[in-house]
Amino acid sequence: MNRSKIASAKFEAGFNCAQSSFYPFAKDAGLNAKQALKLTTAFGAGMIYRGEMCGAVTGAMMAIGLKFGRSEAEDADAKELTYFLVKELHARFENEFGSIHCKQLLGLDDVSAESWAKANEDEKFKSNCPLYVAKAVQITNELFEKLEK
């Protein structure tokens, strides 16, 4: 099964967008399923219903950092590569959907509890978010494959 399908299945199972987009990359980096899902719990719904960065993008950013990020302060190359890849992820995702911000992607006027309830009632999470998860994972996977060649 490809990573986008794995991510989509996680989202359909009830996990949030950040959990779903990070999960398919975690095993390759040595994390188990429980660790991956727990780590990313707080990043869904635009940073816990703040409407900020899309959780699908956040999870993908975390996957990039996990694979290419720096673990030594002096590893400037790893930092620069990670920043470059994240900028590419943002640019491609924004080009596709017009934003990387949850509030705009879901068409919310504000981030009140009423707006989130309305988005849920209108099934925006069900109709929109699977597309965002799949695309964030697809872009990240393409970036990984490009560097692995």
Image (cartoon, rainbow, N blue to C red):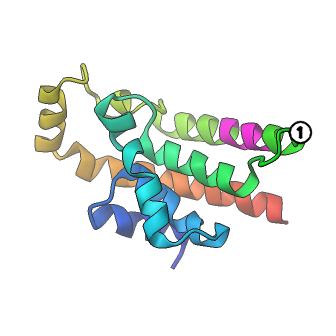
Which residue corresponds to mark 1?
Answer: 74
Q: Residue at x 19, y 23 (%)?
A: 112
Q: Position of residue 92 (x, y in %)?
A: 61, 40
Image quadrant occupied by the C terminus: bottom right
Q: Amino acid at mark 1?
A: Glu
Query: Is residue 141 shown above or below 118?
Result: below
The image shows residue 39 at horizontal and vertical percentages of 47, 54
Residue in view at x 36 percent, y 69 percent: 9
The residue sitting at 57% across, 65% down in the picture is: 26
Which percent across, then down, holds residue 115? 17, 28
Left or right relative to 119: residue 91: right
The 10 Å Cα crowd at callout 1, few under 14, some 14 to 19, many 20 or more, is few
Between 67 and 99, which is closer to the camera in this rendering? 67
Q: Is residue 38 magenta?
A: no
Residue 134, visible in the rendered structure: no
In-front residue for pair 3/74:
74
116 to the left or right of 36: left
Q: Secondary structure at mark 1?
A: loop
**Residue 114 lies in what quarter of the image?**
top left
Q: What main secondary structure does the magenta stretch of the protein show?
A: helix
Magenta segment: 81-87
Q: Is residue 24 left or right of residue 64?
A: left
